[in-house]
Structures are given as structure tokens and as C-alpha cells.
Amino acid sequence: MCNPPAKRQRKRGFTIVECLLAGVILAIFAVTIATSVGQAGNAARRGEDLRQAADRLNEVFTRIDMIGPSQLMYEGPTQGELDSKFAWVSVIEEDVLTDLYNIKVTISWSTNGKVSSIVGYTQIYDPPEANHTTANWYDL
């Protein structure tokens, strides 16, 4: 009688190639996750900068409205710094037929050497007999 051929016993465990492949896959996932977290952090910082710039834009428009665009157009200021990060520039144009003033304000800031800005537009009605505050820009 013939003996059946001996079955090879397969060793259990991972080969070195399987371990290297698993390591490469884990490294790719780790790099992808780290990149995503970094981009999310940058997006959060940009979002916070935009929110603060919008607040500063509102502040500049409020000051222009309180003092009066006609007064600021001739006496200034039309640009300046709001704090150590944000600066502003305004352009005020008068429509003499309607007493409307077209106002453009640009808020700019720098983050990591990159300059960013937002621009806002509005119109303010300011007739010649309007009673404006006696405060100046820096008192507000």
C-alpha cells in the first residue's frame, strides 16, 4: 500500500512582504490624515480672519455714518489702521443730485506674509443740513 503524499503544513503568520505592505498603507493613511488636519486648521484660521475683517468693515461703515461721509470726504481720515492686524482704506464719492454718497471700504490684513482683503460697498444719504456728531474719527 502506498502512503499518501505528505501534506505541507503552512506556517501561520505574516511574511515580511505582507508586513511591509501593511506599513506602507498605514503610512499613506497617516500622511493623508495629517494633511487633512493641517488644511482644516488653515481653513479655520482663514475663517476667523474673515469674520474679524467683516466686524472691522462694519465698524468703519458705522463710523462713516456717524461722522458723515461729506465731512470725512473733505476732512478725512480716509485710511488707517484699526489695530495691529487690520488696516482700512475708504473711497467716498458724492452724487450731488441725490445727496447720496457711494462708499467703498477695503479691509486688509497679513497672515504669514500673505496679504488678504475684503471690500464692502454702501450708500449713505447725507443732505447738507444733516446734523452730525462733533466727534472725530479717533473719539469713536
Image (tube, rainbow, N blue to C red):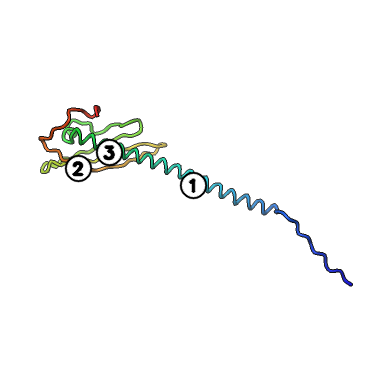
Location of residue 1 in the rendering, given as x and y in whole percent from the top left corner: 89, 72
Quickly name the residue at label 3: 58
In the picture, residue 111 is in which quadrant?
top left
Location of residue 48 in the rendering, given as x and y in whole percent from the top left corner: 38, 40
Q: Residues within 10 Å of mark 3 (few under 14, many from 20)?
A: some
Residue drawn where x is 21% and y is 28% of the image: 136
| Inter-mark Cα distance, 3 to 2 | 13 Å
Specify which label sits upstream in the sequence, 1 or 2.
Answer: 1
| Inter-mark Cα distance, 1 to 3 | 33 Å
Specify which label sits upstream in the sequence, 1 or 3.
Answer: 1
Amino acid type at image mark 2 = Gln
Amino acid type at image mark 3 = Asn
Residue 61, numbered circle: none
Quickly name the residue at label 2: 123
Location of residue 63 in the rendering, given as x and y in whole percent from the top left corner: 23, 34
Position of the C terminus by quadrant: top left
Residue drawn where x is 17% and y is 28% of the image: 134
- The single residue placed furthest to the bottom in the displayed view is 1
Q: Which of label 3 and label 2 is nearer to you? A: 3
Specify which label sits upstream in the sequence, 3 or 2.
Answer: 3
Amino acid type at image mark 1 = Ser
Vertical side of 133 occupied by 95: above or below: below
